[in-house]
Image: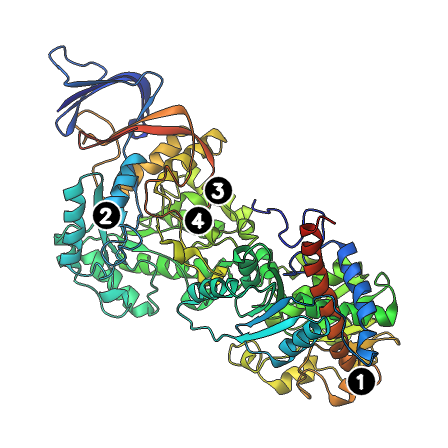
Amino acid sequence: MSYRHNIQLTEDKKLRHFLTIEGIPRNVLVEILNTAETFSSVANQAVKKVPLLRGKTIVNLFFENSTRTRTTFELAAKRLSADVLNLNISVSATSKGESLLDTLRNLEAMQSDMFVVRHAESGAAHFIAQHAPKHISVINAGDGWHAHPTQAMLDMFTIRRHFNDFYPLKVAIVGDILHSRVARSQIHALTTLGANEVRVIAPKTLIPVDINSMGVHVYHDLKQGLADVNVIIILRLQQERMAGAFLPSQQEYFHTYGLTQEKLEYASDDVIVMHPGPINRGVEIESLVADGERSVILEQVRNGIAVRMAIMSMAMGSYQAKQEGV
Amino acid sequence: MKILIKNGRLINPKNQFDNVVDVAIDAEKIFAIDNIPSDFIPQQTIDASGKWIIPGIVDLCARLREPGFEYKATIVSETTAAASAGITTMCCPPDTRPVIDNPSVADLIHHRALQHNKARVVTIGALTQGLQGEQVSEMVALKEAGTVGVGNALMPIKSTLVMRRAMEYAATHELTVFLYAEDPWLRGESVVHEGPVATRMGLEGNPEICETIAVSRDLALIEKTGVRAHFCRLSSLKAARMVARAQYDGLPVSADVSAHQLHLLDMDVGDYSSQYHVRPPLRSIRDRDGLRKAVNEKTINAICSDHQPHDLDAKIGPFSATSPGISSLETLLPLTMRLVKDKVMSLDVAIAALTYQPANILGLDLGYIEENAVADLCIYDPDHVWTLNPDNIQSRGLNTPFMGWEFEGRVTHTFLHGQCVFEL
């Protein structure tokens, strides 16, 4: 068995890296949510900055294109008064490993303090955390199909603002679970925070094998799966799924798994509808629902900055505290 | 040279012999066992009290990386490592660069190995030219150059028609076909076993049907063509069962498994450690136990190293981007003996799967210790406790998940056709 110590935590169980929700204790997740709560007021101040990370350098290391996620990380870092360096690195298919390690070595020389990493390979953030110099914290901004933990935490933050407590909640995640790092991180977060029931709803082609081992119930019928749920999370459907023989067409997908006003009726009266974005209107969700009163999609975007501020300051803070012997 | 090995426990599964005896070697052969004639005057006497004498190991799959990948390892480095691990015969698959699809490459490998003379190296010729899966290779020329069989290494032969023709042609010339059963479409870009671990880690999974569908197709073709075939590196319980059924039905098929498949599991990959990246992937506990059982029942006739030494860079990177394979010559015997110690299999079954059974698959008159047999043997100290570490590993490849493992028992001497090629 190769479960070594959790590299995400310091010896005294504080956040060191944020690579995946898996293995992070419940109290740390709650601390992230509570800290984010204090930061969410910063956005409403005239000066939208706190000096927590003044003099620190944060490198956004994006091996995969993403404007949205990178921008929220950048804003979060700037509101913490850190210096931000954006690096978009396109990866050649042949020498991924080498270029990744070489990139790290080059960045070492630049005296940075934190890497925010997005990469197309699952496990890339772990790899970087293992190979980066000791003083650097690594935040995973999405690796392959594996994890997107900051997205999951901003979703948890949004859910908690609406329901206060996770225990009574039934949550349904609808769509391409197989290829979704967001779904995996949400499942870990919801089960760790104690949600009553987590369901995944998709055709068999888009459900990973043995997903029930992660503590979820599998549904193939949208109406049955949505019955009495308090939270619906709709995942984005990538175009390329048609080519891979996962699905016949967008039309048929919308017909069977697209969230419409009519299907929303099966859920609980207090249901909220979430989507990590960007939305494919008329593919996974109809506009009536996406823009409707149950939708909290824009709240999610807003909450992203506060939650990322919380995670960055906590990860950096724990190392500093250790250095200063606090 | 005349050598006398005294008071060793000779274990020879081929004739069920297990007793403390003296063994006399003269020139390249075993001269006598137990009743040593009084006029045999040895030039060297080795006291093997408390030690075992076992046949030299026959490893069905070891990549020496030469020609083509000398930055990973060479014939010199890997045959030296083999000698230190009690391996006297190693079989090299055709995926060198250039591919072993013509006599000159086979000659080169045989020649280099003979020159260095630390282990006997035999080769498998390419089943199709360039391993491309399209045109049948010049099998007669390869056979004349001494290759022990033909195979397509890890490259798939997608066309069932080409596979049929290749098998028919190999059958014509009485060559054994070595098959790596893997459906290329189901494999896709997968790097781990399809199951809860792949799901949790977000890695593309390799389902068991990837192996069983290929085994099923190949078994039908074997039955049709009558070729003698060997399935390499089985990884699933179901595939082992299918081979057992075929053997029961009288098909000329054998199979092997790598030693690490009998120990490691899919969940060992749990923290993205690239040292556990192997092909076929590590599967479930059910599969591992099924493979162990198949070795016990002799459905799987051989345990091999599946040695794949790598340069350091090949294993540095996110899991999917790293190269599969373990540098495993030096753990082949230790891992197998650990199964004996854990009572998974008897000593007899274990040694047989490392020696005369694989020799039979290769059509070689090796792997046993009897009078007049080729003197390939090792002396093994069952009480020697040691730890595998980067300082004592002989292979050029340091890529092994067993680094730091403590083993009980170690080869102290290796003899290759009567010559001592390793002494601890």
Left or right of residue A176, residue A104 in this image:
left
Whole-angstrom CA distance, mark 3 to mark 2, is 28 Å
- Depth check: give the residue in front, A269 or B237: A269
Which quadrant would residue B392 be assigned to in this image?
Answer: top left
Residue B268 visible within the image: yes
Residue A217 visible in the current orientation: no
Whole-percent x, y for residue B390 in the image: 40, 41
Is label 4 in contact with label 2 (beta carbons under 8 Å)? no
Which badge, 3 or 2, comes first in the chain's sequence? 2
Taking the image as shown, residue A312 lies to the left or right of residue B403, namely right
Mark 2 Cα within 10 Å, few/some/many (few <14, many 20+)? many
Amino acid marked by disc 2: Ile
Identify residue type, mark 4.
Ala
Residue A66: give x, y in percent of width and height.
59, 78
Residue tagged 1: A262
Chain for numbered disc 2? B
Instruction: Give the residue displayed 68% in from the left and 88% down from the top.
Output: A282
Residue B263, label in figure: 3
Q: Are marks 1 and 3 in contact (CB under 8 Å)?
A: no
Q: CA distance from mark 4 to mark 2?
A: 32 Å
Mark 1 and mark 4 residues within 8 Å of each other at the beta carbon: no
Q: Which residue is mark 2?
A: B75
> Mark 4 sits on what residue?
B240
Kind of residue at disc 3: His
* Foreground tag (2 vs 1): 2
